[in-house]
Amino acid sequence: MACAASACSCGAAGARAVASSASASPSVAAAPARSPAAARSPASPPSLLRRLLPKPKKRPGSGIPARLGIRVLVWVRRFAQAGFLLLFLWLVFRTGFRGSFAETGERVRVGLPVEGFLSADPFVGAMTLLSTHTVYRGLVWSLVVLGLTLVFGRVFCGWICPFGTLHHLVGWIFPSRYQKGTVRIEANKTHPRRQRIKYYLLYASLGAAVAGTAIGGMLDPICVMVRSVGLAVLPAAQYVTNAGAELVARSDVAVLQRGSDAVADFLATTVWQRNQFYFHSGWLIGGLFLAVVFLNRFVPRFWCRVLCPLGAFLGVFARFALFGMEKDHDKCTDCDACLVHCQGADSPQGGVKWRQDECHMCLNCEAACPEDVIKFRFLPGRASRVGVPDTDRRAALVTAAAGVALVPVARAADALVPNYDARLIRPPGSVDETEFLERCIRCAECMKVCPNNALHPALLEGGIEGLWTPVLIPRIGYCEPSCVLCGDVCPTGAIQKITEEQKLGIDQKPISIGTAFYDLGRCLPWAMATPCIVCEEFCPTSPKAIWVEEADVPKRDSRAPEDGSAPAMKTVRVQRPHVDPSLCIGCGACEKVCPVKDQPAVYVTSVGETRSKTNVILLENTGYNQPS
């Protein structure tokens, strides 16, 4: 009796499947229902894989199981995403020096390819190629990613990109209660108006690169990830951890204190440095990062679909990929299971053409399809796909022209030449400012690696074109004389790889990034007859660029006589500091240690920097004092 009922049930299901197929495609004759086993290869999956893979859930419709190879690849992709995200974070954690330059006599280098993800970024490679007409040696790795794209499509977006994985992970861990059912299906459909924005950002960035600036790096996902994690997320986490450690220290509970000390030591040697790091405008970088991540609550993988210029760049080449999707539209029952799990909003459903330029190759659609509609294979049929990005030609030309126009408009302002900001102090080894803007992609690797927390993202010190490029703020940290780590990690050559001998001036002129000046009205020996030689003591050059002049100066006694008469005068011997501009390298150590806290009595400006032939201070290095 039970067998008969089961047979009746199977017959009814088969009838419904035939009826659905017939109604979806009237021109095709109804065929007898096929069992799931008959729809696939008769060979059963290996027992080992059957045990390793999770048991498939009950599927709607015909319930045809996904191919074993696709199910395996989906799990391989998940492990690849997790692995590359962890690798990226580990490299960010290792971008730093936690030792002491005084204790080691060896050359200090990071020793790891911490800029590896940036070197493999084709969008960065294309920008620097257009802006400098050269390919920096490390960026050759981007050709590997481009080759993968020409074979497999946008596999970098779905399998490798750490920023894309972060969005995927956030959407999975914190699912939006509004993104369910038909709302999620609608959100995962292709929305041409929204998704073409990233292509316009790509065209504008490449147009700006042609005109001579790599400002498009502000939107590159790898740059965004490094900048946000390194300059906002980690410092904020460090601050919270240190605050928690202080609370535990006050608790007088020995077990908690020992545990807190062990955690603090581990984090200080693995994740961040022992000292709290602060970054200029880090709040803005962190706020934008959180805003972009939060938008996943409304549109899954919002950044990847709408804003990512790297994804758009890969999408242009994905049209030539050898691996792709084929659909059997007649089998589709419009269950929309593929849309529920789609990551790229690339129209995987039946009845419409697949958007190859938008697909992240996550393979979720085939794994979810219960009707055997979707198949990924090499050399698929091209009839049911769209490979060309869906952009308006006129709008594309306008955005590219806007990118080109940005450069003369920005440089016609006063920030670059006539009113160059005195506090725009670039890292040692930086190329000339115009070439620096051609190469700098705002990745913040140099800021993250700086052991003294001296390098920070600029706001408008260098004009709009210099936004988030590195500047040295001596009041927060000074440039370590024997450190060349910023050039060691720079992926584009904006900061050259220099040696300690070049920087220190061993058998050659040292590299200078600026010159120190004194505000005599605030200097203690000059203005207040108070002995102080802190700046001279900390000056690292040999011979010292700061020298002192001994002088006997009058000083009034701070205690007034009891009879109400004027305080007595006395003579105090002080040492008044001076700067020798021919020896000063602009490291900022003097400004960092100046005891006048709010506005230091000694300060460093960029004048006299080695990289510039015009931003000079010593007239003997120019034509002013030359005989006519």
Image (tube, rainbow, N blue to C red):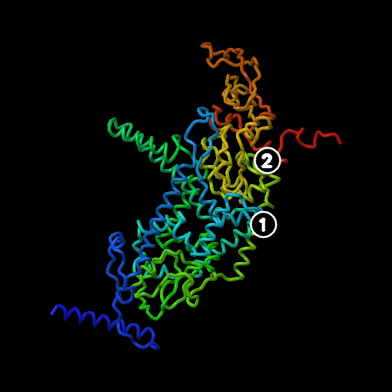
Could you tell me how far apart the alpha carbons at marks 2 and 1 are, in whole angstroms?
Answer: 22 Å
First in residue order: circle 2 vs circle 1: 1
Extreme residue toward the left, this view: 1
At label 2, which amino acid type do we have?
A: Arg
Spot occupied by residue 86 in the image (x, y as percentages of width and height): 41, 49
Spot occupied by residue 58 in the image (x, y as percentages of width and height): 27, 69
The C terminus sits in image quarter: top right
Q: Which residue is mark 2?
A: 611
Q: Is residue 609 left or right of residue 307?
A: right
Task: Label 2: state its secondary structure.
Answer: loop
Hey, which quadrant is residue 273 in on the image?
A: top left
Identify the mark at residue 211; answer none if there is no mark.
Answer: 1
The N terminus sits in image quarter: bottom left
Spot occupied by residue 264 in the image (x, y as percentages of width and height): 37, 36
**Callout 1: 10 Å neighbours few (<14), some, many (20+)?**
many
Task: Label 1: state its secondary structure.
Answer: helix
Q: Are marks 2 and 1 in contact (CB under 8 Å)?
A: no
- Classify 166 as above or below 277: below
Q: Nearer the viewer, residue 496 or 573?
A: 496
At label 1, which amino acid type do we have?
A: Ala
Q: Is residue 251 left or right of residue 420?
A: left
Hey, which quadrant is residue 401 in on the image?
A: bottom right
- Classify 442 as above or below 199: above
**Callout 2: 10 Å neighbours few (<14), some, many (20+)?**
some
Q: Is residue 20 left or right of residue 385?
A: left
State the residue at coordinates (53%, 38%): 109
Hey, which quadrant is residue 328 in on the image?
A: bottom left
Extreme residue toward the right, this view: 628
State the residue at coordinates (43%, 52%): 85
Spot occupied by residue 148 in the image (x, y as percentages of width and height): 51, 61
- Classify 511 as above or below 314: above
